[in-house]
Image (cartoon, rainbow, N blue to C red):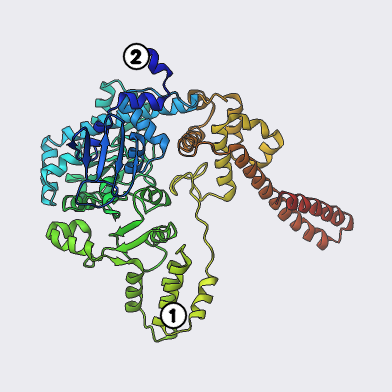
């Protein structure tokens, strides 16, 4: 058997070790049907089972919607995963060790595994503390808010004691180093002292798609809650395991319900998420400590294109909520709004009357109907100023609609309701700038090299480092001159990269500042994620494009400097200097034209 298994590909070996019915039974309820098994299909709505599994052939098929495949196809479809992610997940179940793509991937995998162990132990520590004297008071508070004992256990809620180092001491006693605990986002340093990040707080563990603890949210509780300067909620800072701009709280529990119902319900906080789920909205997920991002939407798009929002829907200004709505519409989501009594959040509504919440969800309004109604109630549609205000609120939303037929419908409706010509509305719509949405490597509170807004040049530099992490050989294509000219802020990192192409982060920690070392870790993690999600991508071609754009930025900067020098030469009436500068300007302009 061992000899045969060595001849198998990883896929075949995983299939040989896993029983398809055992895997599928963890997602759906199977019933024996002769030599086969059957169930209600998880991929479409039906009352009579038409989904069958053949243990002998290790395949499944739905005779209602025609979906079919093997264990890999099933996990990919029901989890919304790419093949690489499904492979890793099933390999873990089967006890099959996959060969790592590179030493870099192996090191990142090892580090993430170690940090995951730290996070899991911390979650168990917090859960245990919920039975302490202070913890029992916290549990009583949760029950008063409407949580059941079952929900407290299901969501693994816990308590962080007021002690400055209770968790730190516990994790050290289990053999983990300070650096591991800090990298998992559980410590705060003040001078030479370190102490627990979470103290005197109710703890909400944040799990990733595979139900592994990635981070934590903490609500202040007890005497500390009376101190005004202490934040009510505190989240884990970004770590190799946790990025608040990418992880949605509760998605690991909600993904099957989202797929089955073909809609996702989005709320704003931990308590909202748990209480609405407890009330029957099992398709709910929550953002935590950030606004809705393009990354959140990309993940949700794997499961559904229908999105229900239960947010504070403030129409005024360029709010974070408005930004999230714009992104969702731009991604092609059908967006609806769960309208509640003003000033109340989902947790309040559910606690008072779960049926009122259910009615609000069932009667959710189209985002456009909501915006039309709200805008026309807020401003006078008959006055020129009111018409302008209404248009300024609604037109940017219409601009985001990717489908031109749907866009035309709402243009016509706005023109009709404002009692103006349709072509005038279209003319105003065309004046709005096209906004290109591209994923970024950092969330906005995590600038790459400095704590200031990122420039396009910085974004290109980041991209170059991601590509170098994928293929260090590309470094040979950056000569010394380009390093000096293009990588002013990151020359130190490139020089370290040249001396450490094997990407040994222990060496980088010695060679680089903490800030630069952390930056490079983030770039390496991004490279690893992309390798899994986008196999076969042409890194070499993208690298050339990035370098070309960096050169163009440098040339434009030089042209600006020469333009200023030309003005000064003209004022000085220095003909010889002017002639030389014009010649330089022309040469650089030609170079820029060729690069374009």
Residue 386: where, in percent of width, then height? Answer: 41, 81
Q: Quick check: can you spot residue 230? A: no
Viewed as shown, does residue 162 lie left or right of 236?
left
Task: Give how far across and how far down residue 144 sits, in percent.
Answer: 10, 50
Q: Position of residue 306 (x, y in %)?
A: 33, 57
Along the line of sight, the residue nearer the viewer: 228 or 276: 276
Q: Which mark is residue 570?
A: none
Q: Quadrant of residue 469 in the image?
A: top right
The residue pinned by badge 1 equals 415
Q: Nearer the viewer, residue 123 or 177?
A: 123
Residue 48 visible? The answer is yes
Q: Residue at x 64, y 44 (%)?
A: 545
x%, y% of residue 453? 51, 51
**Circle 1: is it few (<14), some (14-19), or many (20+) Cα within 10 Å?**
some
The front one of 142 and 172 is 142
From the viewer's perspective, is residue 169 above or below residue 595?
Answer: above
> If the image is split into quadrants, where does the N terminus sit?
top left
> How much space separates mark 1 and mark 2, taking CA atoms?
73 Å
Question: Image height check: is 550 above or below 480?
Answer: below
In what element is the residue under mark 2?
Answer: loop
| Residue that badge 2 annotates | 1
Q: Earlier in the sequence, mark 1 or mark 2?
A: 2
Residue in the picture at 48% in, 67% down: 404
């Amino acid at each position: 058997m061992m000899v045969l298994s060595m001849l198998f590909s990883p896929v075949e070996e995983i299939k040989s070790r896993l029983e398809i019915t055992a895997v599928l039974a963890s997602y759906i309820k199977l019933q024996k049907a002769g030599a086969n098994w059957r169930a209600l299909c998880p991929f479409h709505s039906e009352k009579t089972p038409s989904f069958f599994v053949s243990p002998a052939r290790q395949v499944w098929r739905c005779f209602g919607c025609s979906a079919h495949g093997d264990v890999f196809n099933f996990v990919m479809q029901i989890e919304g995963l790419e093949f690489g992610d499904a492979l890793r997940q099933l390999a873990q179940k089967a006890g099959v060790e996959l060969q790592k793509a590179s030493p870099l991937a192996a090191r990142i995998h090892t580090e993430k595994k170690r940090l995951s162990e730290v996070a899991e132990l911390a979650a168990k520590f917090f859960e245990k503390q919920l039975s302490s004297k202070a913890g029992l008071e916290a549990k009583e508070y949760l029950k008063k808010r409407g949580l059941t004992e079952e929900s407290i256990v299901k969501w693994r809620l816990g308590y962080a004691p007021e002690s400055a180092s209770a968790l730190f001491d516990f994790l050290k006693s289990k053999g983990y180093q300070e650096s591991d605990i800090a990298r998992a986002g559980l410590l705060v340093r003040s001078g030479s002292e370190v102490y627990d990040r979470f103290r005197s707080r109710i703890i909400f563990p944040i799990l990733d798609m595979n139900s592994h603890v990635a981070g934590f949210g903490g609500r202040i509780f007890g005497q500390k809650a009376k101190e005004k300067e202490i934040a009510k909620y505190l989240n884990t800072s970004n770590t190799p395991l946790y990025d608040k701009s990418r992880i949605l709280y509760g998605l690991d529990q909600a993904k099957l319900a989202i797929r089955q119902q073909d809609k996702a319900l989005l709320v704003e906080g931990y308590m909202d998420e748990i209480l609405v789920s407890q009330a029957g909205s099992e398709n709910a997920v929550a953002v935590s400590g950030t606004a809705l991002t393009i990354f959140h939407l990309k993940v949700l798009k794997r499961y559904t294109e229908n999105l229900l929002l239960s947010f504070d829907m403030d129409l005024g200004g360029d709010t974070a909520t408005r930004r999230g709505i714009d992104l969702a519409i731009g991604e092609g989501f059908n967006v609806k709004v769960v309208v509640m009594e003003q000033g109340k959040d989902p947790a309040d509504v559910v606690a008072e009357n779960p049926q009122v919440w259910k009615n609000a969800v069932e009667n959710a309004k189209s985002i456009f109907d909501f915006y039309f109604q709200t805008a026309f109630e807020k401003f006078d549609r008959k006055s020129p100023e009111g018409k302008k205000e209404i248009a300024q609120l609604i037109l940017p939303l219409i601009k985001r609609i990717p489908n031109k037929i749907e866009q035309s419908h709402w243009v016509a409706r706005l023109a009709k309701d404002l009692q103006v010509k349709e072509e005038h509305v279209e003319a105003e719509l065309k004046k709005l700038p096209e906004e290109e949405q591209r994923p970024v490597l950092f969330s906005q509170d995590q600038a790459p090299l400095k704590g200031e807004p990122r420039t396009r040049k910085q974004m290109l530099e980041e991209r170059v480092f991601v590509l170098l992490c994928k293929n260090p050989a590309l470094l040979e294509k950056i000569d010394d001159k380009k390093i000096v000219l293009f990588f002013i802020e990151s020359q130190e990192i490139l020089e370290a990269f040249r001396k450490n192409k094997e990407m040994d982060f222990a060496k980088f920690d010695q060679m680089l500042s903490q800030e630069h070392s952390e930056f490079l870790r983030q770039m390496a993690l991004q490279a690893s994620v992309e390798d899994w999600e986008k196999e076969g991508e042409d890194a070499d071609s993208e690298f050339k494009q990035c370098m070309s754009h960096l050169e163009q930025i440098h040339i434009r900067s030089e042209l600006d400097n020469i333009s200023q020098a030309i003005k000064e030469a003209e004022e000085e009436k220095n003909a010889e200097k002017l002639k030389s500068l014009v010649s330089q300007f022309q040469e650089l302009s030609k170079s820029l034209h060729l690069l374009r």
